Image (tube, rainbow, N blue to C red):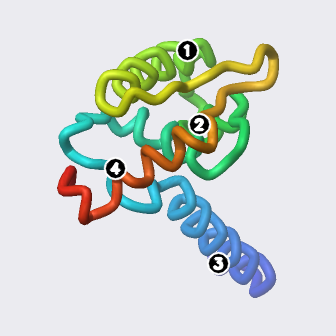
Amino acid sequence: MIPCPACAERFAALEEELAYLKRELRPPTPFPAAWRLPPSEEVILAQLLRHDIVSRARLMAALYGGRDDEPDSKIIDVYITRLRAILSAQLGVGLYCLMKRGWYIGAADKAIIREAMAPEAGNA
């Protein structure tokens, strides 16, 4: 079956948008291997570095993109707990919760994370 030209054009546009969104979910710079971040925590940390406050819904979308088989949203609490422990142990920075709104990393702590990610930091 040959799709109509308008459908094919729309499909191509949606594929392009999906590719863009997938690129946006990746960390801007690879996280240092010494941090030993699992892929889920990398996605969450990338979101926390990009935004002031990150909601559970945003994290679910970033991790699972509306898949039919996505897990219960409480899985975010598990990932946050693990990420919080890693950031505290590796860099001494905090990951905080704003009740009913989401999570955030303070500006000073974001600066510490970005500095540790810099190639000249020797942590990669």
Residue at far front of view: 108
At x 62%, y 22%, the residue is 96
Q: Quadrant of residue 33?
A: top left
Q: Which residue is mark 1?
A: 77
The answer for how far apart the CA atoms under marks 2 and 4 are is 33 Å
Could you tell me which secondary element the residue under label 2 belongs to?
loop
Front one among 17 and 109: 109
Could you tell me which secondary element the residue under label 4 belongs to?
helix
Question: Image height check: is 77 above or below 109?
Answer: above
Residue at far bottom of view: 5
- The amino acid at mark 2 is Arg
The answer for how far apart the CA atoms under marks 3 and 4 are is 39 Å
Of the numbered discs in the image, which one, if any, rests on residue 116?
4
Residue 38, given in percent of the width and then of the height, sits at 31, 33
Q: Nearer the viewer, mark 3 or mark 4?
A: 4
Could you tell me which secondary element the residue under label 1 belongs to?
helix
Residue 104, given in percent of the width and then of the height, sits at 65, 32
Q: Which residue is mark 3?
A: 12
- Mark 4 is surrounded, within 10 Å at the Cα level, by few (under 14), some (14 to 19) or many (20 or more) other residues, namely some
